[in-house]
Image: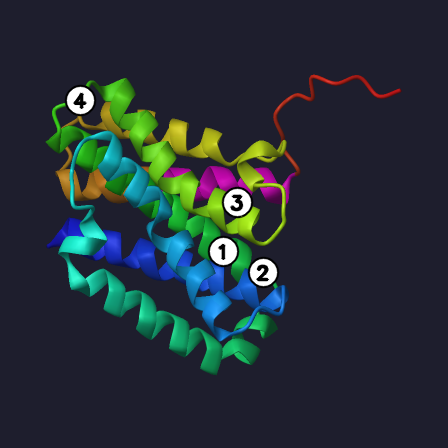
Amino acid sequence: MFYLIMDLLGTVAFAISGVMVAMDKRLDLFGVFIVAFVTAVGGGTLRDLLIGNTPVVWMREYVYIFTIIITVILAILFREKLRYLRKSLFLFDTLGIGLYTMVGIEQGLQAQLFPIMCIALGTMTASFGGVIRDILCNEIPVIFRKEIYATACVVGGTSYFLLRNLPIPDQYVYVIAILIVVGIRLTAVKYKIALPNIYRST
């Protein structure tokens, strides 16, 4: 139940970020729903296909579809309040990558993958939905920019496996790793920390 709640929270967070991007691009209602949907389930779909977990989770569990539909409706109804929070898109996206990183790692553990593969799976789960969202909205995906994004997922996932060796309950380790991902992303953006640029200015 704990992991399902974390997964649904990630679904809500990414669906809201998808709605906000779509509305900024002035898409119609169908476009808003599609962008929100692929943002919310794109990473999980890739994850399930890679580990052979088919049909993918949102096709087996209707709760994900209903969660996305309700989230889209509420986000549209309260769009002015969301826009009032100037950094809400960034915050929802950041919360989403933290939650989805750990959901992907948990799925990797259930598939009995090596830790490094679990971390890669978690990173893809967290990042791929945003990649699809940005491509559909004609934006360069944030994961391909110099901002700290996927790196935060990798560090958070690594910390999860390190913390598991300590006498801490699994649920607490799970939450701590999520907070590490979110904290790294927030800190990197606030202090403009970025990966080195391999191109020399001309």
Q: Is residue 70 above or below residue 46?
A: below
Label whose residue precedes the other's in the sequence (3 or 1):
1
Q: Is residue 144 left or right of residue 121?
A: right
* Viewer-nearest residue: 57 or 160: 57
Q: Secondary structure at mark 3?
A: helix
* Residue receiving disc 4: 113
* Residue receiving disc 3: 186
Labels 2 and 1 touching (C-beta < 8 A): yes
Q: Does residue 34 show up magenta in the picture? A: no
Labels 3 and 2 touching (C-beta < 8 A): no
| Image quadrant where one finds the N terminus | bottom left
Magenta residues, dominant SS class: helix
Q: Position of residue 10 (x, y in %)?
A: 32, 54
Label whose residue precedes the other's in the sequence (4 or 3):
4
* Residue receiving disc 2: 87
- Between the C-alphas of marks 2 and 1, the distance is 6 Å
Q: Is residue 120 left or right of residue 137?
A: left
The type of residue carrying mark 3 is Leu
- Between the C-alphas of marks 4 and 1, the distance is 31 Å
The type of residue carrying mark 1 is Leu
Q: Count neighbours of disc 3 (C-alpha within 10 A) and say few if under 14, some if 14 to 19, many if 20 or more.
A: many
Q: Is residue 62 above or below residue 82?
A: above
Residue occupying image coordinates x 24% and y 25%: 161
Q: Quadrant of residue 34?
A: bottom left
Q: Does residue 186 show up magenta in the picture? A: yes
Which stretch appears magenta?
Answer: 179-191
- Between the C-alphas of marks 3 and 1, the distance is 8 Å
Q: Secondary structure at mark 2?
A: loop
The type of residue carrying mark 2 is Lys
Label whose residue precedes the other's in the sequence (2 or 4):
2
* Residue receiving disc 1: 91
Labels 4 and 3 touching (C-beta < 8 A): no
